[in-house]
């Protein structure tokens, strides 16, 4: 990452004000504005899931984008220790104070609404096929019919919330052989029209995404960024073998 921006007032990656607390609870998602005037949904490092969740969300989102799925962009953003308390509860302010430093920002999509009833929404088959393959690769157990984690804005559908995916946990813990296939509760599980492999996976390119986030997000989980980069490449190679096996069985 670039040098600590905390001494640079109004730098593009630094939060300058908080606009709204979306809901209370353990994660405290809040709308933040950075020095560039961009708005992000802020995910804090001092919540129960900590740095590993930020790393999972960051890498999952970046991998999804690299594979052509429509997702809001993510970036590390910096919370200065003296950021004024403008919104929320005492508990939120305490979490915010303990989160000073690098956190995760998810680009805010103006006018977006959550999809609450997936069955009634019109979502293109191309989007669903990409979603199915991305969530297979990332082992996303948190996208169900009751909780699709999808947004719609101006007829465009966006996939969000990759923090609950299992891929990074399995990579860090070195649990091999890796298992693939959509999780049983996934909203697309069993839909053959959505599970055909359609996306080119380049293992080395996915591994290099580790270099785009703060190193301590991974180091705090007990592995070096270089180690995780290599393991992501191995994991993606295993996924390619999984796809090839699936194609062979279909022939």
Image (cartoon, grey):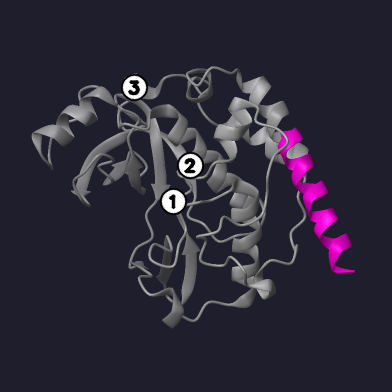
Q: Which residue is mark 3?
A: 6
**Alpha carbons under labels 1 and 2: distance apart:** 7 Å
Identify the residue at horizontal 45%, vertical 79% (top origin): 119
**Alpha carbons under labels 2 and 3: distance apart:** 23 Å
Question: Mark 3 Cα within 10 Å, few/some/many (few <14, many 20+)?
Answer: some
Question: Mark 1 Cα within 10 Å, few/some/many (few <14, many 20+)?
Answer: many
SS class of the residue under badge 2? helix
Taking 249 as reference, is 75 above or below it? above
Using the image, tell me which numbered label, if any, was put on residue 57: 2
Q: Which residue is mark 1?
A: 161
Q: Which residues are magenta?
A: 233-251
Residue 6 visible in the current orientation: yes
Residue 154, located in which quarter of the rendered image? bottom left
Identify the residue at horizontal 18%, vertical 46% (top origin): 24
SS class of the residue under badge 1? loop
Q: Nearer the viewer, mark 2 or mark 3?
A: 2
Type of secondary structure dominating the magenta stretch: helix
Q: Quadrant of the C terminus?
A: bottom right
Q: Are marks 2 and 3 in contact (CB under 8 Å)?
A: no
Q: Indicate yes or no whether the magenta region holds residue 242.
A: yes
Q: Mark 1 or mark 2: which comes first in sequence? A: 2
Taking 148 as reference, is 37 above or below it? above
């Amino acid at each position: 990452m670039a040098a600590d921006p905390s001494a640079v007032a109004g730098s593009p990656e630094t939060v300058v004000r908080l606009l709204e607390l979306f809901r209370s609870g353990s994660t405290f998602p809040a709308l933040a504005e950075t020095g560039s005037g961009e708005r992000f949904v802020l995910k804090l490092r001092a919540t129960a899931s900590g740095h590993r969740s930020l790393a999972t969300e960051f890498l999952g989102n970046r991998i999804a984008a690299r594979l052509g799925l429509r997702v809001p962009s993510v970036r590390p953003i910096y919370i200065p220790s003296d950021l004024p308390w403008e919104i929320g509860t005492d508990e939120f302010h305490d979490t915010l104070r303990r989160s000073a430093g690098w956190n995760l920002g998810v680009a805010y999509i103006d006018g977006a609404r959550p999809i609450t009833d997936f069955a009634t929404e019109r979502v293109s088959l191309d989007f669903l096929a990409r979603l199915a393959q991305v969530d297979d690769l990332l082992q996303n157990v948190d996208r169900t019919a009751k909780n699709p984690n999808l947004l719609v804005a101006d007829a465009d559908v966006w996939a969000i919330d990759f923090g609950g995916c299992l891929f990074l946990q399995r990579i860090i813990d070195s649990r091999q052989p890796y298992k693939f296939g959509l999780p049983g509760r996934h909203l697309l599980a069993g839909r053959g029209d959505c599970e055909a492999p359609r996306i080119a996976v380049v293992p080395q390119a996915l591994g290099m995404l580790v270099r785009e986030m703060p190193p301590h997000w991974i180091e705090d989980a007990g592995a070096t960024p270089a180690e995780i980069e290599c393991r992501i490449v191995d994991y993606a190679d295993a996924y390619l073998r999984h796809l090839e096996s699936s194609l062979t069985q279909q022939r």
